[in-house]
Image (cartoon, rainbow, N blue to C red):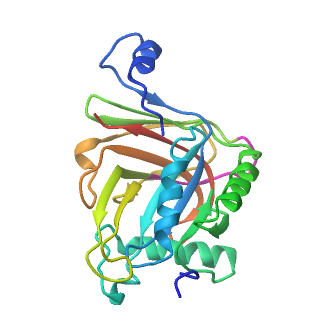
């Protein structure tokens, strides 16, 4: 029924990169974003949740877990769901014009959607997205602030919005009822909220945000920054993304 339903943290390397231990860890690189729309009440989702965790080992991929709440009526309320995630999923479907909304659904770089448990389909979509020009976004956390550097556009006409997401790198959940009753599932890079940092008009941009101003559902230990075309109600292609840990 429900089928339609990193920075990599290397302490020594970071110290060598900046020359001193305890300083800011700067995250950059050209990452392909894989957003998994999932639900604790979806019997087809655990395989996709596991696959998303495996994707986290790929330094060129930024996996993000977006739990939705529209299956809560089946007997278990998703403990990680945010109402905005279902709205984002509907926005993607509207932008594509295909009305495809299901779990587990993986959206790759804001454009291609595939079944979230289909490893080969995700790998193909990631490879295709990697062939495009990606912005080398950089994120650093230091002195109680998140610092973001976005380079100038690689192509004409690029513009969009800048979003920051607090993340929980790994969240274990024991599901007590519903179709996944009794299962222990670990969710990877759980999105705890969405904070709009500003607009990007294609020019090089540097901005900062105090950690004290970042709020989300539950605790978080990392942040992700996405530069994305479109608007919140109709998101488009992700031009670039990066993550950084919060110590």
Q: Position of residue 43 (x, y in %)?
A: 46, 78
Q: Residue at x 52, y 64 (%)?
A: 48
* Viewer-side residue, 194 vs 38: 38
Residue 221, by quadrant, is top left
- In the picture as drawn, the residue positioned furthest to the top comes out as 19
Q: Would you say 45 lies left or right of 72 here? A: right
Q: Is residue 14 above or below residue 27?
A: above
Q: Would you say 155 lies left or right of 42 here? A: right
Q: Position of residue 157 (x, y in %)?
A: 72, 52
162 is within the stretch colored magenta: yes
* Quadrant where the C terminus is found in the figure: top left
- In the picture as drawn, the residue positioned furthest to the front comes out as 182
Q: In this view, does 113 lie above or below 141?
A: below
Chief secondary structure of the magenta portion: loop
Q: Position of residue 203 (x, y in %)?
A: 61, 40
The answer to whether one can see residue 213 in this image is: yes
Residue 101, by quadrant, is bottom right
Q: Would you say 190 lies left or right of 205 here? A: left
Q: Residue at x 72, y 40 (%)?
A: 154
The answer to whether one can see residue 195 in this image is: no
235 is within the stretch colored magenta: no
Q: Residue at x 51, y 75 (%)?
A: 44
Residue 78, by quadrant, is bottom left
- What are the residue bounds of the magenta stretch? 154-163
| Numbered-mark total | 0
Q: Where is residue 54 in the image (x, y as percent from the top left)?
A: 52, 49
* Viewer-side residue, 81 vs 223: 81
């Amino acid at each position: 029924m429900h089928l339609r339903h990193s920075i990599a943290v290397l302490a020594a390397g970071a110290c060598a990169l900046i020359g001193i231990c305890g300083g800011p860890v700067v995250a950059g690189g050209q990452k392909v974003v894989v957003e998994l729309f999932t639900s604790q009440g979806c019997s087809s989702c655990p395989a996709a949740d596991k696959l998303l965790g495996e994707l986290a080992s790929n330094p060129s991929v930024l996996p993000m877990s977006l739990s939705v709440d529209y299956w809560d009526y089946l007997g278990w309320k998703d403990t990680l769901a945010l109402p905005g995630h279902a709205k984002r999923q509907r926005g993607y479907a509207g932008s594509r014009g295909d009305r495809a909304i299901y779990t587990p659904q993986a959206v790759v770089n804001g454009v291609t959607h595939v079944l979230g448990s289909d490893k080969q389909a995700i790998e193909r979509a990631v490879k295709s997205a990697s062939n495009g020009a990606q912005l080398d976004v950089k994120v650093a956390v230091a002195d109680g602030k998140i610092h973001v550097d976005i380079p100038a556009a690689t192509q004409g006409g690029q513009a969009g919005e800048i979003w920051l997401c607090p993340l929980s790198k790994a969240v274990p959940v024991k599901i007590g009822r519903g179709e996944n009753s009794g299962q222990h599932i670990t969710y990877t890079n759980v999105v705890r909220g969405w904070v709009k940092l500003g607009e990007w008009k294609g020019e090089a941009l540097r901005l900062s945000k105090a950690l004290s101003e970042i709020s989300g559902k539950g605790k978080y230990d990392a942040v992700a920054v996405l530069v994305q075309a479109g608007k919140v109600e109709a998101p488009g292609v992700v031009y670039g993304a990066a993550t950084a840990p919060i110590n």
